[in-house]
């Protein structure tokens, strides 16, 4: 292989590395398209309690905020990839889910509410994970095809390398997709006392075939992360309903005192 051919092969390798590292570069900001899902959790036979959604605090680990990885393991979306802050995203999802369950009535002012509800966002993330073997296999397949097309000529090495790089970029490989949302809700009464607190984790696992350079972040957020949030909220609301139901029951009146038989004598 001549020096010019070596330069071309090196350039192809460098271009492939840039494409793989910048998969998804320049893409649009990720939006959280939260699906409607009405489930009736209303309290039967009692007044619907009013709730004011107070603060949503971001307590996610730094790896979720900054994102990481390009090849074998990718954590996304990073903070600057979101169209809105993660706390705003979850606050809107929480309000939507509460309204669609009929469990409570949301009010705009804290002074109008029976309870104040705050949230700690502990996790909101997606992860893609691939094995190193998948890159090797796709590279070998692409290299074999490229060498075959070279026909055993002096260009077969060059076409083989180019084919290996093309195979690594274009052939879908098995990819494990994981999405999770973990939230802690805290319910306070009018005096500010905590009457209930619970943490729930929602997870979604999926295995699919995606090319190594593909970054289907928006699609995976829509498909998996929204479902993870739904599962976390469903866990929280089931227990919140029990607490609100117990607190709405009237306190039983004390039993009347029995007459003193000694005094009667």
Image: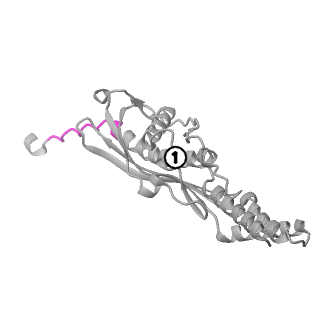
In this view, 110 is above or below 88:
above
Residue 67: percent from the left, percent from the top? 50, 55
Name the residue furthest front.
Answer: 3
Q: Secondary structure at mark 1?
A: helix
Q: How many marks?
A: 1
252 drawn magenta: yes
Chief secondary structure of the magenta portion:
loop
Q: Residues within 10 Å of mark 1 (few under 14, many from 20)?
A: many
Q: Quadrant of the N terminus?
A: bottom right
Q: Quadrant of the C terminus?
A: top left
Q: Which residue is mark 1?
A: 229
- The answer to whether any part of residue 92 appears in the image is yes
Residue at 36% across, 27% down: 108
Quarter of the view holding residue 15: bottom right
Residue 132: percent from the left, percent from the top? 65, 70
198 drawn magenta: no
In the image, 53 versus 129, the foreground residue is 129
Q: In the displayed structure, does residue 128 sit left or right of residue 16?
A: left
Residue at 36% across, 33% down: 51
- The answer to whether any part of residue 249 appears in the image is no
Magenta range is 247-259
Residue 220: percent from the left, percent from the top? 62, 49
Colouring scheme, one of rainbow, by chain, secondary structure, one colour? one colour
Q: In the displayed structure, does residue 161 sit left or right of residue 38?
A: right
């Amino acid at each position: 292989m001549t020096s010019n051919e070596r330069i071309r092969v090196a350039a192809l390798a460098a271009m492939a590395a840039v494409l793989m590292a910048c998969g998804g570069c320049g893409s649009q900001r990720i939006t959280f398209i939260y699906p409607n899902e009405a489930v009736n959790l209303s309290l039967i036979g009692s007044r619907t309690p009013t709730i004011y959604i107070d603060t949503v605090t971001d307590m996610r680990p730094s790896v979720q905020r900054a994102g990481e990885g390009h090849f074998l393991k990718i954590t996304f979306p990073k903070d600057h990839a979101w169209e809105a802050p993660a706390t705003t995203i979850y606050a809107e999802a929480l309000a939507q889910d509460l309204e669609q369950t009929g469990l409570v009535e949301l009010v705009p002012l804290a002074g109008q509410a029976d309870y104040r509800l705050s949230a700690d966002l502990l996790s909101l993330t997606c992860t893609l994970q691939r094995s190193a073997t998948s890159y090797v296999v796709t590279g070998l397949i692409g290299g074999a095809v490229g060498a075959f097309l070279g026909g055993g000529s002096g260009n077969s090495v060059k076409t083989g390398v180019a084919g290996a790089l093309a195979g690594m970029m274009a052939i879908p490989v098995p990819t494990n997709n994981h999405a999770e949302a973990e939230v802690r809700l805290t319910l306070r009464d009018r005096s500010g006392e905590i009457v209930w607190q619970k943490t729930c984790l929602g997870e979604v696992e999926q295995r699919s075939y995606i090319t190594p350079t593909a970054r289907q972040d928006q699609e995976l957020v829509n498909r998996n992360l929204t479902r993870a949030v739904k599962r976390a909220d469903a866990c929280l609301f089931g227990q919140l309903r029990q607490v609100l139901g117990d607190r709405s029951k009237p306190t039983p009146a004390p039993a009347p005192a029995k007459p003193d038989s000694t005094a009667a004598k």
